[in-house]
Amino acid sequence: MREATRFVGRHSGAVAAVVAAGVLVLVAGASTCSRATAAVRWERAFYDAEQLHIDGQHDAARQRFAALRASAHRGQDADEAGLMACEAARRGGETLAAAACYDALGQDATEREVRARALLHAAEIRVFELERQADGERLLWILVERATDTAAGQRALDHLYAMARDAPSRVDATVGRMLDLARAAPLSDLADNLLIRTAMLLEARGGTADLRTADEAMMAFERDHVGSPARVAALMVHARVLTRLDEPAREAVVLEKVVGDWEASAVFGSYYVPDHSAAALRLIALYRGRLADLERAESHLHHLVEMVEAQSGVFEVIAQLADVQEQRGNLRAARATWRRLVQLAEKRDTELRGFDARVCGEEARSEDRGRCSDATRTFAPLPVKEVARAQGEIARLGGLIAARRP
């Protein structure tokens, strides 16, 4: 017993420490559990407020969301509740209160993105609901200048562009401010958006002076924003401007850059947007027409066939390629291209019949499978209007080739 007493005595400090640590763990666990329980209650209350909002009880929802914002433990939660409180006021017809709510949230929300969203909504209410356009426009320009990197800032720029587009009397003022901002920071991400929208507004109005200014804006874009995600769209705007200025040689240079974007993709032709084929088609028309360069036309036709091979328009492109090859005196190549057209049509038809067979094969009963197969065998070949012409051209070119033989 004395030994035991001495043991306890020697280790009483350690025992006390262990006991104290255990008490701290229990207290900490209780505190964590309490916080978790509070968070769950807050989330449940938020869900209940959302249901009121969905049910159309907007005033009750607004009050709930406002209380939830005040009681939130995290800034992110408080911001979300704040946005919902403002939106509930807006949906409940309290337009002035909603605008004031968004104004306040735009000043004191925790997260910058939420402040930008709130100011965007405040501006939209003024422009589209309160008919206080000057006040709303002021907020939109603030967003464009200070929060361009946010989705709200980009949306604000969209609004300013659309407002000027729909009210021609506003174009000069809007374009002037956009160009001033672009010149102030010519290499910024904001500048490329401003230059594109400037050119689009001026192209739409369409005066000669407008088109010249749009041309200058797009030349600045091409010089300073080679890596912009909007590059292809901007080049197409520039090409349209040059079409209207009747400068086909410069237009071709711009369109070559669009096609070059497709050709330079990581895997040849793996990145495709409709502007690529539209640019190629316009180039082909220019090279077959006013620019009179059949070699370039044929080169772009070969690329265009690759671009649109999976689309129905490929047959018309192949037909154009055969025509250009014949114009250049290469009858054998033209005949081979017409044959390629027929073969592609046959391949498409075969693939379609294979699809029909798979569909029929999924029928559960053998008699249904048989009826389905009988029906699909009656289907006419896939209609391709260029096939009939191709067959005639193959025969005609064959005769010309034979006549040339010594």
Image (cartoon, rainbow, N blue to C red):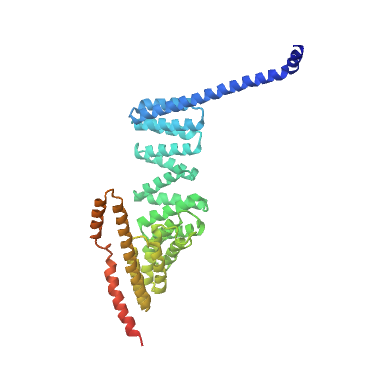
Is 26 rendered above or below residue 365?
A: above
Query: Would residue 71 be found to the left or right of residue 363 on screen?
Result: right
Query: Would residue 13 be found to the left or right of residue 223 on screen?
Result: right
Residue 49 point in image, percent of width and height: 39, 27
Residue 255 point in image, percent of width and height: 42, 64
Which quarter of the picture shows residue 21?
A: top right
**Quadrant in the picture for the C terminus:** bottom left
Please state which of residues 79 and 277 is positioned toward the viewer in this rendering.
277
Which quarter of the picture shows residue 99?
A: top left
The residue at 43%/46% (across/down) is 157
Q: State whether residue 245 appears in this view.
A: no
Is 58 rendered above or below residue 115?
A: above
Is 34 rendered above or below residue 204?
A: above
Please state which of residues 237 and 169 is positioned toward the viewer in this rendering.
237
The residue at 50%/53% (across/down) is 183
Residue 312 point in image, percent of width and height: 32, 61
Please state which of residues 61 and 182 is positioned toward the viewer in this rendering.
61
